Image (cartoon, helix red, strand yellow):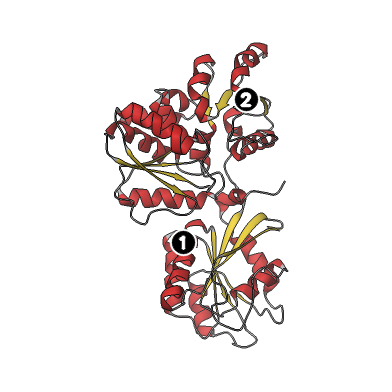
Amino acid sequence: MKSPKSFRLHIGLFGRRNVGKSSLLNAITEQEVSIVSEIAGTTTDPVEKPMELLPLGPVLFIDTAGIDDVGALGEKRVQKTKAVFDRTDLGIIVSNSQDWGEFEEKTLQELKDREIPVIVVFNKTDLYPGRSCMLNSLNGEKLPVVETSVSTGAGIDALRETILKTAPDDYINRPAIVADLVGPGEAAILVVPIDKEAPKGRLILPQVQAIRDLLDGDSFCMVVKDQQLPKALAQMNQAPKLVVTDSQAFAQVAAVTPPEIPLTGFSVLFARFQGDLTEMVRGAMAIDQLKAGDRVLIAEACSHHPIEEDIGTVKIPNWLNKYVGGQLDIEHARGRDFPADISQYKLIIHCGACMWNRREMLSRILKARQAGVPITNYGLTIAYSLGIFERALQPFPAALEVYKNER
């Protein structure tokens, strides 16, 4: 099975038109990924290329349009390029030694402000020899600088090596999804309702990732449907360390899971794994401040067509309206179509973002914080609305303490 995008290191290539970003990507991947032409502005939309960059592992290169594009259409391309910052784990600024200036400095500052590691590549060194003062300046900032020439192959291996050395530590030492809550040799029960959102022969991605994470942690698990949980608990000689359920079945599962057995949801696990659990716990507490007519944004990373009884478009709105005691003004955003102005909302409720990398989810959390808008996720919203919030936070003492202190 291929690694999902959410598990890949996202490497963004930024630079002016015609500095050779696409040629460089083709050279790194040893494939014709991006169209190459001497005409400036050939790349119009971000181009993604997943690959295995050994020994680092799975990565996703993102080739972007030139940051100096012009005209009305060019401005739209530039906006798409800027949106790539939100999901970049490692930035590569491509230039030649003659043209380093305002565009490159702005890109460098944007990456620095976001605390994204940066590599500077001076490309086309066969045509534009290195400028020693610029190299000395960047080296003085302790920025890794690589000189390359796609036409001769010079520097490509050095760039691959620099990528490995510059990869963020939190990517290499990524936290566990659930295994740290269970422990080696211990068991978890995963409750997986089979409904229209789980087509025949498939499990949804967070469930698959949780199973693999438990195996990697030398834990083991029993996977059951919600109606099978009582029998599964009765047949176990030793109580499981943890029960994890699909958030939609929180109420049913909480009713049959003994209180001494910690219980949480897949979506709550992903609030920690992909985002900031503490911030999202505070966001869920804002539900108490909602009143009829307030604007609420429900955002999904996926752009799938909603099905009947869809959790984001039907179930969560119903639970929230019931909790508030009136009709909220609920809007939806899917994929990367996120409103530029979010200050109008009283609350943002996000999916688990299992299809994204963590940086993109953290970028949305940061935008919400800057706008003064609380943000939470599906599982925490459901648990709060159903009155089992403390139970869902039981495996996370620090988050539970925040809730109790700020309640």
Q: Looking at numbered disc 1 in the image, what kind of residue is underneath it?
A: Ala
Q: Label 1 crowding class (10 Å Cα cut-off): few <14, some 14-19, many 20+?
A: some
Q: Which of the labelled discs sits on residue 83, or is there none?
A: 1
Q: Residue at x 58, y 51 (%)?
A: 171
Q: Which of the labelled discs sits on residue 188, or is there none?
A: 2
Instruction: Give the camera-side residue of 310 and 110.
Output: 310
Circle nearer the viewer, 1 or 2: 1
Q: Give above or below for 318 relative to 306.
A: above
* Res. 64 in view: yes
Q: CA distance from mark 1 to mark 2?
A: 39 Å
Residue 119, by quadrant, is bottom right
Q: Looking at numbered disc 2 in the image, what kind of residue is underneath it?
A: Ala
* Res. 259 in view: no
Quarter of the image that includes the C terminus: top left
Q: Position of residue 216 (x, y in %)?
A: 68, 37
Q: Residue at x 34, y 31 (%)?
A: 321
Image marks 1 and 2: residues in contact by CB distance under 8 Å: no
Q: Element under label 2?
A: strand
Q: Position of residue 123 (x, y in %)?
A: 60, 79
Q: Position of residue 72 (x, y in %)?
A: 41, 75
